[in-house]
Amino acid sequence: MRYLFLLGFILTSLSSYSQKITRQDSLRGSITPQRAWWDLVHYDLSVEVMPESKTIIGTNVMTYKVLNEGPNELQIDLQAPMKLTAVMQDGHSLDVRSEGNAHFIQLENPQREGELKKISLSFEGKPRIAKNPPWDGGITWKKDSNGKHFIASSNQGIGASVWWPNRDHPADEVDSLDMHVTVPKDLVDVSNGRLVHIDTDATTKTYHWTVKNPINNYGVNLNIGDYVNFSEVYKGEKGPLDMSYWVLKEDEEKAREQFKQAPMMMEAFEHWFGPYPFYEDSFKLVQAPYLGMEHQSSVTYGNRFKNGYLGRDLSGTGEGLKFDFIIIHEAGHEWFANNITNKDVADMWIHEGFTSYSENLYLDYHFGKESAATYTIGTRDKIRNDRPMIGTYNVDKEGSGDMYYKGANILLTLRTIAQDDDLWRATLRGLSKEFYHQTTTTAAVENYIANALNLDLTPFFNQYLREKDIPTFEYKIDKKEMHYRFNNTIQGFTMPLRIKINEKYIWLEPTDIWQCLDVPKGTSTVQIDRNMYVDIRKM
């Protein structure tokens, strides 16, 4: 199959869509009473990774703030076959009531409003082996060409609780994180944030990484291998930015050449989206034994040091070979997914739609607006319009896999409607500022864009996000009159539409009611501005 990237997501998406909603889905996907009364503050995660037995053992000391006096239970998530082996608070061992992957800790001491509390979660086991990373994730256990272990976590969708205990829901990001990762002495661990210290003993090394900014659970990662490191300092909008690259020794020469695109990415995205959101934690590209993912401040990379997607152009236009897909796409997630994060995975289009559109903006910045448009338009043949882009709330269910390229084409359409590229850029940068380090919803993003562009976009978003079909512009020409309307839409749908008649562009305001326009005699066909994602049908 040519387009493995979308295929992987589509299969996972279709599978989750067809499954019956279960009790486990609700426990994972909703703010249960056992989650509602406390707020995450800090994780101090210590893990030892034992490659030969494919085992992890560790402790997560979680600091939280009591928001109100809730039930005497606190929900933590950890997926089998991993096991909670001990839970401690205030020097006392606590009982745990488990229901599948949800574990309800029975608290003994009072939980007073405003207090900061700590709880220690010890765990161990052989975590799920990733079947098709990053789409069907877990831990990947491989070896490099020299026989050295090459290991990585990837858990978007399946959840970070596949390998460590945490509050596995996107609405509440932890404010900061420390990781202590112990590995065999001949290996290196690269995780999120900045490397603080390395402790060495006779057989192991422990790498201490610290993250100063809020981070989503699925962005926390392990990368273990025979790594070498090189770096540079990028002169960014907020000052010097440390950009660091970690690759296998055997691939250093290729990486030094291919990763020249990383500062080009940073330049383009800071232009369009505003400053990189995590200066305090640096930016890293880390080679991984799978395609790649948007782990915050440690973006993983496995695109074989080729342009395109594993050397192929997903758009079929040639434009996609002008950049390394994984460097650009996964780093784009630093703004949309890691900086701006959905409160519910039903709104995952915020992550994937904007980030797929970031591919367009990278091309726009470095190669021009027409190159960018050609690329995005070329991806339309992968859009299925099978179901809405927004999923089902509170049950851990994403929307259609169309969130990638339909999302990008929706945003290309909005830029066209805006009719002002400076305003469009200001709107994108405004999103990054308005929702800086926050979790948010589709409704909030819609409202911000509509207000920024000073447009009523309610019909637009209801059609493109909440319905599976796109509008069809229908027209018929009778002598000197063109009759036109939108069909295949929600009732009352309207949006500005730029069309071309006899080599001249004009703007219309079609609705779902027939309207009439005088046209020059002899007019026979009409074209829609190619940047607008609308079907057309001559009657």
Image: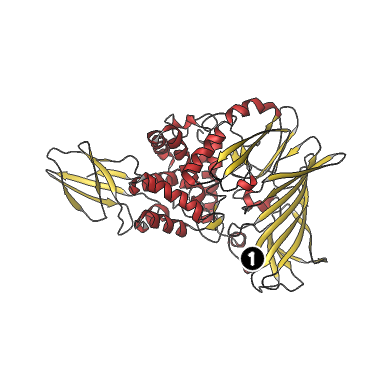
Instruction: Inspect this view and state whether residue 404 appears.
Output: no
Q: Amino acid at mark 1?
A: Arg
Q: Which residue is mark 1?
A: 35
Q: Residues within 10 Å of mark 1 (few under 14, many from 20)?
A: many
Q: Nearer the viewer, residue 465 or 81?
A: 465
Task: Reply above or below: 461 against 504.
Answer: below
Q: Is residue 44 left or right of residue 507?
A: right
Instruction: Inspect this view and state whether residue 357 appears.
Output: yes
Q: Residue at x 19, y 45 (%)?
A: 476
Q: Nearer the viewer, residue 243 or 155?
A: 243
Q: Name, please, the residue furthest toward the top.
A: 253
Q: Residue at x 69, y 66 (%)?
A: 74
Task: Reply above or below: 487 against 52.
Answer: below
Q: Nearer the viewer, residue 387 or 60?
A: 60
Image quarter for residue 84? bottom right
Q: Nearer the viewer, residue 323 or 4?
A: 323
Q: Measured from the top left, where is residue 10 in percent x and y?
A: 51, 44
Q: Measured from the top left, where is residue 135 in percent x and y?
A: 58, 44
Image quarter for residue 371? top left
Q: Is residue 129 left or right of residue 304?
A: right
